[in-house]
Amino acid sequence: MAAHDEAAADADAVKRHRNLFRAVKRRKDPPLRRTDITVTDEAAVKRAVKAASLGNAMEWFDFGIYSYLAVTIGHVFFPSGNDTVQLISSFATFAVSFLVRPIGGMVFGPMGDKIGRKKVLALTMILMAIGTLAIGLIPSYATIGFWAPVLLIFFRLVQGFSTGGEYGGASTFIAEYAPDKRRGFFGSFLEMGTLAGYTGAAGLVLILNSALGADTMEQWGWRVPFLVAGPLGLVGLYLRLKLDETPAFQKMEDATFHAASEGASTVETTAKGDLAKIFREHWPTLILCIALVGAYNVTDYMLLSYMPTYLSDELGYDDSHGLLILIGTMIVLMLLITQVGKLSDRFGRKPLLMTGMVSFFVLSIPAFLLIKQGSLIAVSAGMLLLGLSLLCLLGTMSATLPALFPTSVRYGSLSVGYNISASLFGGTAPLVITSLISVTGTDMIPAYYSMAAALVGIIAVSCMKETAQKPLSGSPPSVGTREEAAEMVEAAAPTPRF
């Protein structure tokens, strides 16, 4: 009898477990509520975009002036003798700053996930301004000898350390402010800031070269752009300090939001900023980020940093003419970049990124063959081919990369991945290309290097998921208007059964 009762009890237990399993299978996610959706303030979004983009422009103005003055800096800070050795030494010092960028990313990225994006972006702006201003005050090699390149390298390290927290923070800041359906458009302004910084640096160097001449530039003229960077840094700092923290970060930190919302399970609730967690739990995405950024940065630095030097050193172009052509190319890119951002919102990130990577793979050799012709039209056409290929990446990448990672580790993961890649492949591009040309004797090395990077990029884009018009991972949906929020709630409501 007891055995019979035990068997009956076991049968009842099995039945209860089966019913529970069926109930769990039938259970649906709670309906989307209005409180689960972030409605962005258009004015606040524009302020955030302006502050992040202008700050980014200041950062890349600081970086650009060094690359455009590479030949002069080589003469000022390194022993006289072989011009090629001086140039390689100058580019080596350029590359040195990239060695500490991953360290900066590992420090500032998790810090941004802990204390907020705004405070860290203000700190990186201060450090960059100090580093750049200090370079403009260093005495020459002829004055203090060995200590001149030592001080130059030290302050380049300060610049590189600060930049380690810049791009990841600025792109995260804009991505978390922007509505989901317009993230590509608003994100493209960040790269417009990059182009504006490079254009401003190239324009100032061009004016100084034309007005002062080579001798005066080596004596004191090269210092002017570096000294200008100090006041510009203060402007960027002021703009950033006036901003509020991003809505995504605020909601992640707001415990009451999670208690009030049944959709809280979709939102990250902590911001540990744990590097070990990033490498342990997000390493596949981190590798994807490194591959995407590597392909993008090689082509970016090759065109925007190295090309004036290539035109002058390899093709015998006057320094001013090379800068003028690059400025014209960058102005065209600035005029078109927001349209590329809109296209990425409409058609997706992957089609635009793939177009850019394939274009670099196919067009690099024809573009450099045109550039080698030497005429103004041919060089301009070759530069424009490369520029339009880069535009597909510039206008899309700043919306693509932040969407790879969840809110709680977004700043940290992106800063680490971006700067490891920039350190290995981006900042070293001018040095590697110059050295390979010197060793091989062929001036087509930049084309081959771009093609290799593009091939890696094609594989990386093929492996990534489409993120256009979707909420950021770990964040609630973000829309531009209350009407759009109401439509989203209505569309998500379950269909009544009769």
Image (cartoon, rainbow, N blue to C red):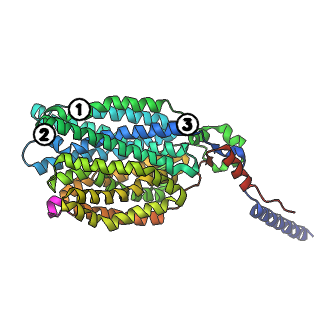
Give SS at disc 3. helix
The residue closer to the viewer here, 375 or 7, is 375
Residue 84, placed above or below residue 248:
below
| Identity, as a three-letter code, of the amino acid under mark 3 | Ala
Image marks 1 and 3: residues in contact by CB distance under 8 Å: no
Relative placement, left or right, of 280 versus 444 is right
Q: Position of residue 337 (x, y in %)?
A: 42, 51
Looking at the image, tell me whether mark 1 or mark 3 is earlier in sequence order.
Answer: 3
| Residue at (9% x, 34% y) in the render | 142
Looking at the image, tell me whether mark 2 or mark 1 is earlier in sequence order.
Answer: 2
Residue found at the far left of this picture: 81
| Identity, as a three-letter code, of the amino acid under mark 2 | Ala
Task: Tell me which segment is drawn in magenta.
Answer: 437-443
| Residue at (14% x, 34% y) in the render | 140
Q: CA distance from mark 3 to mark 2?
A: 46 Å
Q: Position of residue 446 (x, y in %)?
A: 25, 60
Q: Position of residue 464 (x, y in %)?
A: 49, 62
Whether 440 is among the magenta residues is: yes
* Quarter where residue 221 is shown: top left
Residue 252, placed above or below residue 278:
above
| Identity, as a three-letter code, of the amino acid under mark 1 | Val
Give SS at disc 1. helix
Residue under label 2, please give it.
Answer: 214
Residue under label 1, please give it.
Answer: 224
Q: Which quadrant would the C terminus be assigned to in this image?
A: bottom right
Residue 371 bears which disc, if any? none
Residue under label 3, please give it.
Answer: 44
Looking at the image, tell me whether mark 3 or mark 2 is earlier in sequence order.
Answer: 3
Give SS at disc 2. helix
Q: CA distance from mark 1 to mark 3?
A: 35 Å
Whether 161 is among the magenta residues is: no
Q: Which quadrant would the N terminus be assigned to in this image?
A: bottom right
